[in-house]
Image: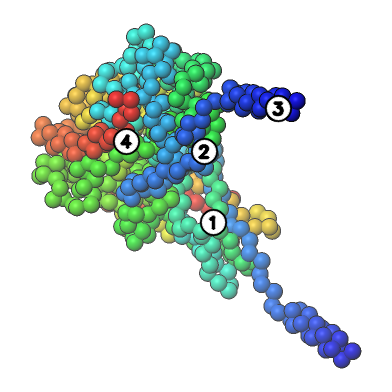
Amino acid sequence: MKRILTLIVLGVICLTCNRTETPVPKAKKVIISLSHLINNQILTSNKYYNLINKDSIRLVKLKYYIGNFVFHSPNAHLRPATSNYYLIDGFINKEINIGELPADNYHSVSYTIGIDSVTNAASNNTGDLDVTTNGDMYWAWTKEYKFLVNEGYSKNDTSQKENAFVIHVAGNSNIVRDTLRNIVFQNADNYHLICKVDIGKLFLSPNKVNLNAPIDIQTEAKAKPISQNIKKMISLY
Amino acid sequence: MNSIYKLIALGLFLLIIACQKSNTDPAPATTIYNPTSYNLTIPSHLGNNYVIPDSNKLTVEGVKLGRKLFYDKRLSKDNTISCGSCHKQQFAFTDDNQLSKGVGGKLGLRNSMSLTNLIWQKSLFWDGRVVGLEEQVMHPIRDTLEMAMSIPQLCDKLQGISEYPALFKGAFGSDRITPPLIMKAIAQFERTLISSNSKYDRYLTNGSKEFSKKELLGFILFNTHPVPEQNIRGGNCGDCHGGNLQQSLDFENNGLDAIFKDVGRGRVTRNMSDNGKFKVPSLRNIALTAPYMHDGRFKTLEEVLDHYNEHVVSSNTLSPLIAVASNIDGSAPKLGLTKDEKLAILAFLHTLTDSTFIMNPEFSDPNK
């Protein structure tokens, strides 16, 4: 009888202890959706779009590396990433699953467009950074990644002559780090952010690109104004 | 009486054994299904961005069968053409003819592509119409300009060749020859065709001492984009042929024509903006794979360099990478390389030749 009573008492103690433990916040999946637009129209390849200044462009390639996401709450600065960098093809509204975060009140997220200098100097990266199968995102001549590749044709507002443009942004000084503030998630089940990527801003803001002639931007120095434009291209829906 | 029963029993016993023998095919040793995993060595500098389907893991038996099929002319309608007829090992598995001859001497429409480092490819054929090696296998077999063989007939034909059922059983556990098994076997062999032992590969390991001065200059020019205002001279090759596969895996219009006799990628996507684009081929073993371009129009590498240097034709699908590039300000798409610079690039291109690849006995015709 005594043994039974002892077991009952122990059982009650155990249950009480369990109740007093602090609940572990449930982890939620982190998803980032990137919708690529020009003048609020969904971007597709080889279609002419008017920019705000009436110049027009058609893109044949738009790719860039995004990554190093850090979510900020009043309590923490956390990286959900299962991988550090993701190669985005601008003609696909890319949804990237970047791991999990514990439940918290996240108010902003920081991200990078480009590759950090250590990874940039390594030649044995894998996945999206594998230079063997992503050779179009690598400058073999300077042995570094292209952070953003933007190729196509343009027409100036006044002359309708078609000019080619090649804009390759690379070089450690051109890495872009920015923060999206006042983030709002799409639902309670996961941390899903929907972002719009305004490609028109690559040509206009804050540095206007002259589309009246062929454009060949393929050095770190020449790409600097474009890297400032890159900083303006992503915003929250 | 007893002895009569004994005799009848003995007779029945002998009859049963005889019947069993007559109903059972001879079982050669190779029909036992116990395949050995094939140890495919992947050179680290070619990276791990490749997929071998779980449904077709490489085995010694599968690769051996695939190699035999690859070189067997009986896969064609009139027993005259094998895969190896147009993908010759001595030419890095391409054809030295501008257009390959199929059954009945019919000419194909495009130059035969080199079969090298295929496991890294995201698409196959000049127009990228196929994404998997298994699927690719049947295209030339069925094509009336190539092997012109109906697939059901092919299965029946191979089933009737005494050596094949046992080889299929050894490779896949079934001696019933089916299209998927033929596709799997040839794809297995094709995945083994890895070329990674050129002078260029040795340069990657040992550094510039492997290259002559001219080859090194050629390598630098090959990779460099020209920036005339900064006096940076370049051949502008690396954007499309960079990386250790020497290809971007993209489709580009490299300025051959203003009007496209063959629309290339556009035929697959049905998108006019892809007209005139073709898969960027690897430049590995490029000195062995003449003639060049999708239609084999250039006989020599010198002609190819002259094209990029002086004869690029503008069109609305011309690659912007070519359209804006020049060593002389305002002269794009004329590249403006000097004669010596072209010779240096040519010297570098020859460093991409892998003689061990074209001499490897494991890739050769097993019937010879």
Disc 2: CA contacts within 10 A as few (<14), some (14-19) or many (>=20): some
The image shows residue A221 at horizontal and vertical percentages of: 27, 51
> In the image, what residue occupies the spot 53% across and 28% down?
B175
Label 1 residue SS: strand
Nearest-to-viewer mark from 1 and 3? 3
Which numbered disc, 3 or 2, marks the residue that appears first in the sequence? Answer: 3
The residue that disc 4 covers is B362
Disc 1: CA contacts within 10 A as few (<14), some (14-19) or many (>=20): many
Q: Does the CB distance between marks 4 and 3 fall below 8 Å?
A: no
The residue that disc 1 covers is A98
Label 4 residue SS: helix
Q: Does the CB distance between marks 1 and 2 fall below 8 Å?
A: no
Q: Amino acid at mark 2?
A: Tyr
The CA distance from mark 4 to mark 1 is: 43 Å
Do the residues at pointers 1 and 3 share their chain?
A: no
Q: Amino acid at mark 1?
A: Ile
> In the image, what residue occupies the spot 32% across and 47% down?
B43
Q: Label 1 marks which chain's residue? A: A
One can see residue A148 in this view = no
In the image, which disc is placed on residue B3? 3
The residue that disc 2 covers is B33
